[in-house]
Each structure stands twice: as structure tokens, then as C-alpha cells.
Image: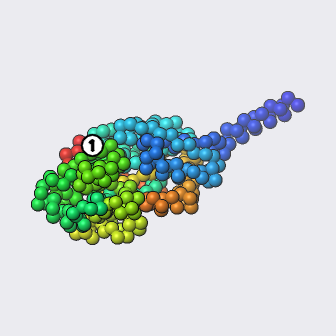
């Protein structure tokens, strides 16, 4: 009888372990971009207080290369047990359209949208152009003379500037750089006339009055930059803004109950006062959408991007 009771207790113990509450151990958040960059910094700020909301820590792991393809591929192929979460970014909207990878957002279990960033066109503080109107009129009179720095063909900033040029008959001389920092440095050094960046990326330079932001490609003015007009307000509107974005996703086939835990936990991290204060300080526009809203946004983004990629010769 004693042996029977011991055996029965063992069965219940094993059964309880098999159904232990998720998560039992720390999570991994894969970031497809390098440590210290904007996306990495946002990821670390987001999970800073993770243990308060999900009971375990979330450790950021950077997997870089291939314009984000390596890291997002690692997210897609991760074990679908809920312990690996990915921070997916704008490239996932263009990889397949540009022939860089077959991956799209449809290869992932979407969790939530984190933010949308609008492109800004900036010049040095002592530039001869004080408005988008000044710039466009000069560029039309001098086709190809205005040098415009950006962070690579097919990124949101390049496509926003390209869409402006295509819609309003402006020919820029596009100069690619390996990231936002060298683009900003080139502008300050006088090596380019104009920079297309995320508006949040130039907040410090704008606050220090080292640059002038001529306009932002968005439907509404950014709350941290109330004096910066939208393209439309400046007289050069587009059918729809091309927005950079970041969000959270899982590999396919994670059990539904674990997905639900992660959705709730990461939404609480998103709403954490420390995280929101950080984003306000750096001018990052937070935009929450649940999985359904995130999917709808990404579907619309492909529809917006395809014509611009085709017009710039990047559609494959």
C-alpha cells in the first residue's frame, strides 16, 4: 500500500510539472539589428520591467545580417514553445517585393504593433532652404543636383523621399549610407544637401538647432515636433505615407494558451510608465495594434509599397 501511494504521488507530481504555469524560465527576444542601434535600444527599454508583468526576465539577443533577414529568419525557425519572441521590422514588408527573401509577415504569429515612425526631410541649420517649397522648387530647376542621404535602397526613408519625387516631378541624387548615424554625420559635415531619416532619429539635432526639419511624411504632425508640417501641409502631399514600423511576433504553431499569456504580458510592458516615458523623451511614436490590427496594417503597407518600389525599379 505504501509503495502504491508513493507511486501515485509521483504520477501527480509529474502531471503537475507537465502542466506547470507558462513561462517557467526566461524568454528570449530576438532583435534582427545590432546592439546599440535604435531598434535594439527600444527592445531593451520594452523588456526592462518584464519580470513585473510576466514573472520572468526577457533577454535580448541580437542576430544581425542580410538587412534583417538573418534575425527574422531565426525568429521564424525558432522552436514554437513560446520562449522565443521576435522584434520584426519594416524590411519584412519589402523582402519578397524586392526579391531579397520569400519571408513575409504571413510566416509569423503576430503579437502586436509597437510603433510607427514617419520619415523626415532635414537640412543643415544654415541651409539656403527654409521650407519644403524652397527645396522642391530648387530641385525642379536643377534636376539631380540635390544630394539626398538615406539608409539604403528600399528602406522606409528612401521610399518616402522617392515617392515625393515621383509624385511631384522632383529628381534627387540619392546617396545611401550604412545606417542613420552616418547619414546624420554626412548632413552635418556638408557632404549631402538633404537627409531622409526617421523624425525621431533627428530629435537631438533639431533640439540643438543644428538642423532644420522641412517636413514629415505623415497624416498628422508629430506631437514632439509641433512646428514641423506634414508633406501635405507643405503643399506636396502623397496618397498615403510610407511608415517605418516595429512589432512583436512568434514562430508559427505556438500553443494558443501561451500566445495569450505573451499577448497580455507584452501589452503590459508596452503600457509600462518607464517605457512610455523613454519613448516620449526620444520622440518615438508608439502605436499599439493587437494581432488583427497589426495584420491589417501590414497588408495595407504592402499595397502602398508596391507601386513605389515598381516606380523606383526595386520591385522584383
What's the colour scheme? rainbow
Measured as percent of width and height from the top left, residue 16 is found at 72, 40
Q: Against 126, is 159 above or below? A: above
Quarter of the image for the C terminus: give it. Answer: top left
Q: Is residue 172 left or right of residue 258?
A: left
Element on which disc 1 rests = helix
| Nearer to us in this view, 135 or 262 | 135
Q: Position of residue 34 (x, y in %)?
A: 43, 41
Q: Quadrant of residue 284?
A: bottom left
Q: From what the image shows, is residue 167 above or below residue 47?
A: below
Residue positioned 27% across, 70% down in the render: 233
Judged left or right of residue 221, residue 2 is right
Q: Note whether residue 188 is visible.
A: yes
Q: Looking at the image, which residue sits at the far top?
A: 3
Q: Position of residue 95 (x, y in %)?
A: 32, 43
Apparent side of residue 298 relative to residue 193 in the rendered image (left or right): right
- Who is closer to the viewer here, 128 or 40? 128
On screen, residue 125 versus residue 5, left or right, reads left
Q: Is residue 27 above or below residue 271?
A: above
Whether residue 109 appears in this view of the structure is no
Mark 1 = which residue? 98
Amino acid at each position: 500500500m505504501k509503495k502504491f501511494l508513493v507511486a501515485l504521488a509521483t504520477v501527480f507530481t509529474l502531471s503537475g510539472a507537465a502542466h506547470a504555469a507558462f513561462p517557467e524560465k526566461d524568454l528570449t527576444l530576438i532583435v534582427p539589428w545590432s546592439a546599440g542601434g535604435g531598434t535594439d535600444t527600444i527592445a531593451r527599454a520594452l523588456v526592462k520591467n518584464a519580470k513585473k508583468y510576466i514573472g520572468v526576465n526577457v533577454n535580448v539577443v541580437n542576430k544581425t545580417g542580410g538587412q534583417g533577414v538573418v534575425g527574422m529568419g531565426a525568429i521564424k525557425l525558432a522552436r514554437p514553445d513560446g520562449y522565443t519572441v521576435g522584434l520584426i521590422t519594416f524590411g519584412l514588408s519589402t523582402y519578397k517585393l524586392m526579391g531579397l527573401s520569400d519571408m513575409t509577415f504571413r510566416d509569423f504569429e503576430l503579437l502586436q504593433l509597437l510603433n510607427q515612425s514617419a520619415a523626415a526631410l532635414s537640412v543643415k541649420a544654415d541651409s539656403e532652404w527654409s521650407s519644403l517649397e524652397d527645396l522642391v522648387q530648387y530641385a525642379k530647376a536643377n534636376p539631380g543636383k540635390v544630394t539626398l542621404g538615406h539608409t539604403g535602397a528600399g528602406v522606409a526613408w528612401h521610399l518616402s523621399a522617392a515617392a515625393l519625387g515621383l509624385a511631384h516631378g522632383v529628381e534627387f541624387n540619392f546617396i545611401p549610407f550604412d545606417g542613420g548615424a552616418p547619414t546624420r554625420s554626412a548632413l552635418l559635415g556638408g557632404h549631402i544637401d538633404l537627409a531622409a531619416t526617421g523624425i525621431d532619429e533627428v530629435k537631438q539635432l533639431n533640439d540643438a538647432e543644428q538642423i532644420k526639419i522641412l517636413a514629415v511624411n505623415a497624416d498628422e504632425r508629430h506631437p514632439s515636433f509641433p512646428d514641423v508640417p506634414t508633406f501635405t501641409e507643405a503643399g506636396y502631399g502623397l496618397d498615403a505615407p510610407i511608415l517605418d514600423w516595429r512589432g512583436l511576433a512568434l514562430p508559427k504553431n505556438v500553443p494558443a494558451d501561451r500566445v495569450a499569456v505573451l499577448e497580455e504580458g507584452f501589452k503590459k510592458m508596452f503600457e509600462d510608465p518607464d517605457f512610455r516615458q523613454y519613448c516620449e523623451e526620444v520622440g518615438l511614436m508608439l502605436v499599439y495594434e493587437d494581432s488583427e490590427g497589426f495584420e491589417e496594417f501590414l497588408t495595407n503597407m504592402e499595397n502602398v509599397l508596391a507601386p513605389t518600389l515598381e516606380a523606383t525599379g526595386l520591385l522584383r
